[in-house]
Image (cartoon, helix red, strand yellow):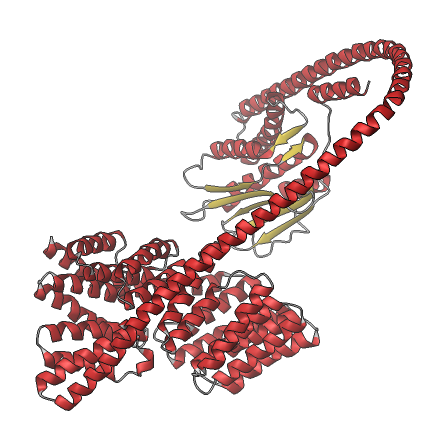
Amino acid sequence: MKRFWSVFCVLIISSGLAFSQDNAINDLRLLQKSIKQSRPDTSRIKLLLKAGDYYLNKKGWFKVDKDTALTFLNQALALSRILHTVKWENEALQCIGYSYLHVDDVENGSRFFMKVIQYYRSRHDKDLEAKTWERFGDAFNRGPNTLEKKIECYREAQKIYGLNNEPVMSFLAYKKTADMHMIQGRYDMAEKELKIIVKGLKSIGYKNLHFTFDLLASLSKLKGNFHQELFYKKEAVNSMESTGDFSYASYLYYNLAMTYFDLGLYSKSLQYLYKALPFSIAEKNYNRYYEVLTNIVKAQVQEGNINKALDFLIKSTRKIPPANDTQRQWMDAAFGICYEKLGQIRDAEMYYKDLARLSDIDLKNQDIEDYLRNYNTISNFYVARGRYKKAEYYLGKLLNVSPQLIRPSVMSQVELLQFKVDSSSGKLASAIKHYQHHKKLNDSLYNATNKKLFEEVEIRNESEKKDRNLELQSKNIQLLQKQSLLEQNQMDRTKAIKNVFFGGFFLVSVLLALGYNRYRLKQRNNIQLQEKQHIISEKNEALVKLLRDNEWLTREAHHRVKNNMQTIVSLLSSQSLYLKDEAAYEAVADSRHRIQTMSLIHQKLYRSDNMSSIGMRGYITELVDYLSESFKTKQIVHFKMTIDPIDLDVVQAVPVGLILNEAITNSFKHAFPYSDNDCLTISLTQGCADDLLLTISDNGKGLPEQFDGDNVESFGLKLMKGLTEELNGTFSIVNHEGTTLAIVFKKISLHLISVEEIEVLKKQINADS
């Protein structure tokens, strides 16, 4: 089993990178093909912007990618100006500005963003101006030379949002400013700003505070205040759960779990890691999935459940195999730890070597914490084996990283490992120095004070829950007091009613006498109404009988018309057998198809419950089947039909059917066969109001180059134009990659009253009587 799993992982590692690269290349080729095939409209602009974005955010980015991105973005800008679409022109300008800022070309990048800002400013569009300032700030890199520029942009956005009475957006822009101050190392200022933001957002009823709390947690971590880090991470999770906004649940649960892990509270850590795992799958964030999975394994190993951890790891990686280098690194680390703890050193080293190889390959695209974690894990393995030279190589890489970028728990382990390496080499002064650093960090993490502070955090959370319960109890008491007052008022009202009752008794007696008199009058009127109702009922019954007879006669008429047309079709079929002239034969065949087209309509009418209209979806399907069979081309021509559920009156259904007959017949005769993928597309859709669009298009050889739609002698085309005029519609024909006919007309509705509607009217008349 172990050998099988090792082979499986090696296969995954060797094939995964090529698979992901092939996918990226295929996506790019598909995008380029879509751009070439698109029409010069806003759809092409979107595709060009998407292509530019692909090159700007390409993995393993080079300067040539910026030039390629600019080529696509400039094409999008030019097309948007030709089409006079200001929205897409401004979008293209911002994307071009972003491409320059991506390589720290502040002058050119700012120039393009300012064009958009000046436009919105001239139109007094404060909302879009503020959003552009915010996007301008997002576009700058987080380098030391551009952080102040980012802050300036965010402050402009914050100011305009405030003037435009958008307090939520103003506070969120302010939060980005605080984030930049935190990156600059101005921790006290950032903390003060974030607390103002939390207070301000709470005051206006904004509840989605989890990301602000998460930022405060990161700040607390940087300041070395671990109990505050834990408190804010719990607040972030509470905010997420209370609002039901689980869009970043895997991230927030995982963050809280790792703080518990750093404090050595592994069971607590596992509680939140297990919560994070299904959310990472739901979010399709498989990098996070492997990150959570590996830390579940680490926590289980720390609690002594090594075999359980290995079984869980094997099942989980089978369920979702790793798809990229980042995921394979997490998997290597997890398997390495399990096999190391089980004493299977050779297997563990195999995974650790692959982990080091992948870390070196993915160095440019790797998160610093992943880089540190990988080399720390490998160093720990070699120190435990007494292979200090190997360990020293990896520890050297870790010690060259700024301590501020390493989690205190990880840094403590690194210092301890370096102490062991130096001790083995006889470097006693260096060993003592590293041990002191380890001890200091370890004490700050695990001393009694921090344990007490952790308990305080737990107590604070419990206290807040109790406060909320007390608040609910207070509200319940207030409700009971209000209920008591209502009951007292009810009693007072009952007494008042009793006092009024005797006074009103006399009035009621008088009213009863008057009521009796009215009753006698009403009885007399009811007798008269019953006589009138009897007359109305007799007339209604006669009308219903007449309507049913009329319906039967109409159905019979449609049936006879259909039979007569079928007789004509049969006669024409018989007559065509004796015709030797090809033109005459085709003329008779065309007439036969036209009559059959109308016959289908009458067949639909006498079989339908509603004889005033035709369901076009079923009718067009039957007509296409009939014509396909007539021309015996079912195996060659493919049909694509998009028919909305539309019912047409006979007055419109007949011309539509004849137009379809002519167009399909012409395609069979003149457009096909053209290729192995001959296709005929029919569409009848309803637009706004009662506008209907009928299109029939083929991908055949198309019309001749000298074709003039206005001066054509074809009977079929003249017939279709005449039928379109009968529909009061517009007729157009396009010759592009085949032939497309388009007819736009308005739907008319001729409503005939049914027996059911007569019954409804009858009930209404009876009710009114």
Considering only vertical position in the picture, is 274 above or below 762? below
Furthest toward the bottom, the residue is 429
Q: Which residue is drawn at 28% across and 54% down?
A: 320
Q: Is residue 686 visible?
A: no
Q: Which of 289 and 307 is in front in this view?
A: 307
For the C terminus, which image quadrant? top right
Q: Residue at x 37, y 55 (%)?
A: 279
Q: Nearer the viewer, residue 370 or 23?
A: 370
Q: Which of 432 and 678 is in front in this view?
A: 432
Image coordinates of residue 350 in percent, x first then y, are: 13, 67
Image coordinates of residue 619 in percent, x first then y, are: 57, 31
Left or right of residue 459: residue 547: right
Image coordinates of residue 188 in percent, x first then y, are: 46, 81
Q: Residue 258: which quarter of the image? A: bottom left
Left or right of residue 618: residue 32: left
Q: Nearer the viewer, residue 9 or 396?
A: 396
